[in-house]
């Protein structure tokens, strides 16, 4: 089904607020509604995982920003979650998506190391990619690029790049 990204983010914020009511989380959305074809519960889970990591791996008083941009490339949506935390060493930026992999630098915080492996699987079945980048302002920026349609499109995305009803 077509999922309104604004609705997804609002559910994510509600869930995150339950365990982190006071954290400063900003959201930047495009002016017009944007839609991803897929499973909204899974997409919500991806963002809850990533925002939870941002909360876990950055100091309480720092800001987290969720940026949704539809103008980077045609029919691709970019969703970024930026934090001002400890960052991820370049040598580990790929391995953090492996199941059970946890960085040496974060062993003091509990976790199983499954969150990002699950995120990657969910993003990929939706035809997207997920990478960890250095945040230009310091910290980490997780970036998802995923097929989308702006409001008004009638056909769902298919993996072959064809349109189908
Ligand atoms: P869980 O399965 O409970 O999510 P986890 O958070 O350790 O456990 P992942 O979410 O898969 O596992 O993340 C893997 C590792 O990547 C983390 O242990 C941490 O070292 C690193 N990491 C993930 N997000 C960030 C971030 N925003 N800043 C710094 N390090 C991060
Ligand atoms: Mg995690």
Image (cartoon, helix red, strand yellow):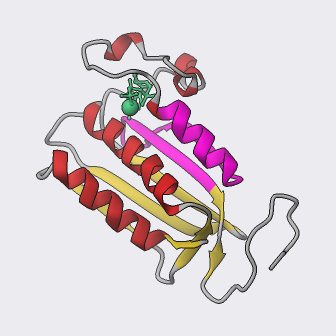
Closer-to-camera residue (51/58) = 51
Vertical position of residue 2 compared to residue 38: above or below? below
Residue 155 in the image, given as x and y percentages of width and height: 75, 80
Residue extent of the magenta highlight:
116-145
Give the residue at x 17% y 45%.
Answer: 19
Residue 77 in the image, given as x and y percentages of width and height: 60, 64
Q: Residue furthest bottom?
A: 152
Q: Dividing the image into 4 quarters, which one contains the N terminus?
A: bottom right
Vertical position of residue 165 compared to residue 70: above or below? below
Give the residue at x 26% y 19%.
Answer: 109
Q: Is residue 125 magenta?
A: yes
Residue 86 in the image, given as x and y percentages of width and height: 32, 26
Quadrant in which residue 136 is drawn:
top left
Q: Is residue 95 magenta?
A: no
Give the residue at x 75% y 68%.
Answer: 157
Give the image quadrant in which the ligand numbered 2 is located: top left
Q: Dividing the image into 4 quarters, which one contains the C terminus?
A: bottom right
119 left or right, relative to 56: right
Give the residue at x 62% y 80%.
Answer: 150
């Amino acid at each position: 089904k077509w999922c309104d990204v604004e609705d997804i983010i609002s559910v994510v914020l509600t869930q995150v607020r339950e365990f982190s009511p006071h954290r400063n989380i900003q959201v930047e959305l495009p002016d017009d509604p944007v839609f991803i074809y897929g499973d909204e519960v899974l997409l919500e889970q991806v963002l809850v995982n990533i925002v939870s990591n941002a909360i876990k791996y950055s100091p309480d008083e720092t800001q987290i920003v969720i940026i949704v941009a539809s103008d980077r490339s045609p029919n691709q949506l970019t969703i970024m979650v930026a934090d001002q935390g400890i960052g991820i060493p370049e040598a580990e930026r790929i391995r953090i998506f492996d199941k059970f992999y946890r960085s040496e630098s974060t062993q003091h915080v509990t976790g199983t190391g499954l969150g990002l492996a699950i995120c990657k699987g969910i993003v990929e079945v939706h035809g997207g990619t997920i990478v960890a980048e250095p945040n230009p302002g310091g910290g980490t920026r997780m970036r998802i690029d995923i097929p989308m349609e702006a409001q008004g499109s009638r056909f769902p995305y298919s993996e072959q790049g064809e349109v189908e009803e």
